[in-house]
Amino acid sequence: MDGATSGTPSTVACGGIYRNNEVVCIGCFAQNLGFDSSLIAELSGAMQAIEIAYRKNWRNLWLETDSMLVVLAFKSITTVPWSLKSRSKNCINLTRNMNFVVSHIYRKGNSCADRLVNIGLSVTSLVWFDEFHSEYRTEYIRNMLGLPSYRFVNV
């Protein structure tokens, strides 16, 4: 999962992709969260991922995020902003009924989640896809095969 903003503060969105044990997409989501901060986007994305998995009765969830603050939020509720504390506590309770792991990956660890966030910035609410968006099929296949994704910056 991932979260992003189009500025600070500005419109924020989150997105996530669910994969089975064979790395095949079994669903994904994108959501516009309105006007907020990137921390809210990251935390909301993680909570949305947990809530959807729980509703779909997917009890084995490994949440990968590029945000160490999200990882820390599952270790200590004190790192969660007050506006998300109640939802965060509910999600932590949901994870107690799951085989749940949260881990940190580097920024470009999942380019598919990045693409879903971009979709989230252009929609008005939560959207669900049963398969990865066809516009990004090449990106999905590269990611599924474990091929690297680079971002080059001119300096």
Image (tube, helix red, strand yellow):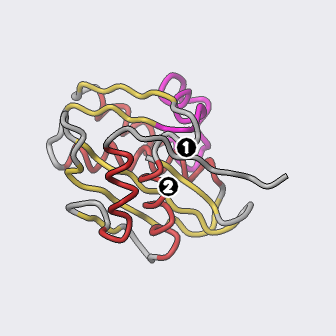
- Whether the magenta-drawn stretch holds residue 81 is answered as yes
Location of residue 29 in the rendering, given as x and y in whole percent from the top left corner: 34, 59
**Mark closest to the chain's N terminus, 1 or 2:** 1
> In the image, which residues are magenta?
65-85
* Residue under the image location 55 percent in, 43 percent down: 108
Residue furthest to the right: 155
Are the residues at dot 1 and dot 2 in contact (C-beta closer than 8 Å)?
Answer: yes
On the image, the x and y values in percent for residue 123 come to: 44, 76
- The residue that appears at 28% across and 65% down in the rendered structure is 128
Residue under label 2:
114
Q: Answer left or right for 128 relative to 59.
A: right
Q: Secondary structure at mark 1?
A: loop
Residue tagged 1:
108
Q: Residue at x 49, y 49 (%)?
A: 2
Residue 11 appears left or right of 135: right
Q: Quadrant of residue 57?
A: top left
Q: Quadrant of residue 66?
A: top right
Q: Which quarter of the picture shows residue 64?
A: top left
Measured as percent of width and height from the top left, residue 51 is found at 30, 47
Q: Residues within 10 Å of mark 1 (few under 14, many from 20)?
A: some
In the rendered image, the vertical position of residue 139 relative to residue 147, given as above or below: below
Judge whether 104 appears above or below 29 on screen: above
**Position of 38 compared to 85: left or right?**
right
Q: What residue type is disc 1 on?
A: Lys
Question: Magenta stretch mostly in which secondary structure?
Answer: helix
Instruction: Count residues near mark 2 (Cα–Cα under 10 Å), then give few for <14, some for 14-19, many for 20+.
Output: many
Badge 2 amino acid: Asp
